[in-house]
Amino acid sequence: MSLLVTGTIGIDTLHAPTGEASGVLGGSCAYFAAAASQLTPVRVVGAVGGDWPEAHERQLRAFRNICLDGLERRANSQTFAWGGRYFDNMNRRETLFTRLGVLEEAPPKVPAKYLDSRTVFLANSHPLVQLDLLRQFKDRPFAVCDTMDLWINIARPELMQLLSEVDGVIMNDEEAMQLTECRNVVTAGRQVLANGPRSFVVVKKGEHGAILIHRDGVASVPAFPADLAQVVDPTGAGDTFAGGFMAHVARAGRNDFDTLRHAMAWGTVLASFTIEAFGLERLARLDAGQVDDRFRAFRAMTAFDAHR
């Protein structure tokens, strides 16, 4: 099934205990597309401003499976920009600045040639923007969304409407608990599912893996056991997880419980590469052999026999 993603494409400034990086390519859409392209072709719908560096476009185009025909360049606008600082415990970070730029304008249109996309991921943006993009498809695709704490706080009714129109949602544990006021992750996921998506909820737990709450059951995967010395920058790990997850669904051409369980594993493996460098640098140096080798290693780590 053809895969399409829409979301932010931005310019990031990153500060971490491992170093700093200024003006690097970032945004939920960029990380998702870079990860998904390792497994299947992906179509991008997004907008950037007149300050969008040519080097960033070249970097995205260097991923052979990314189509940028849906990227709008708005000469008189500014590109979304974000700056963040990570603490010694890189599970904690603070936002230093956010410049919304094109996100304060009308959302991009889905090109006519993309309207046959059968798998759609609505990466993090305002729920009304996500709904607008979804409703541009006359033949309803398999659609999954992401969200964040800001929209839970200021746009909860719109978010709940969005959740009622998608097949699944991928969110982190804090967001699931914030939305439901449940402190147990599985209970929170079940409540989100009961009040929203048609099929499933994936709750990301960072270094503790992810849980799939599906109408046909529950499954979990651990995080890939990264060497702490190799964790350079955790930015975009969640978006990369979503990219690997949705790419596997798209190439499998199915969205049943078992396919989604395997999709979580692919998402976990690709996220484990992202954290090894700033921005998209590590994903840009990946090849299929490296991805397959790490997937096999992850599968071996998580497999067990049912012997007593």
Image: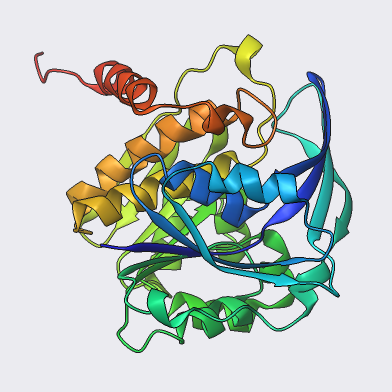
Whether residue 282 is situated above or below residue 64 in the rendered picture: above
274 on left or right of 301: right
Residue found 50% across the figure and 34% down from its top: 271
Residue found 49% across the figure and 42% down from its top: 63
Residue 112: x and y in percent read 43, 82
Residue 154: x and y in percent read 74, 75
Viewer-nearest residue: 41 or 234: 41
Residue found 9% across the figure and 14% down from its top: 307
Q: Is residue 2 among the parts visible in the rendering? A: yes
Residue 306: x and y in percent read 11, 20
Quadrant for the C terminus, please: top left
Viewer-nearest residue: 248 or 259: 248
Viewer-nearest residue: 270 or 30: 30
Whether residue 22 is situated above or below residue 107 in the rendered picture: above
Quadrant for the N terminus, please: bottom left
Give the quadrant of residue 45: bottom right
304 on left or right of 82: left
What residue occupies the far left of the structure in this picture? 307
291 on left or right of 19: left
What residue occupies the far right of the structure in this picture? 96
Give the quadrant of residue 275: top right
**In this figure, which colouring scheme has been used for the structure?**
rainbow
The mark total stands at 0
Whether residue 274 is situated above or below residue 112 in the rendered picture: above
Residue found 28% across the figure and 56% down from its top: 250
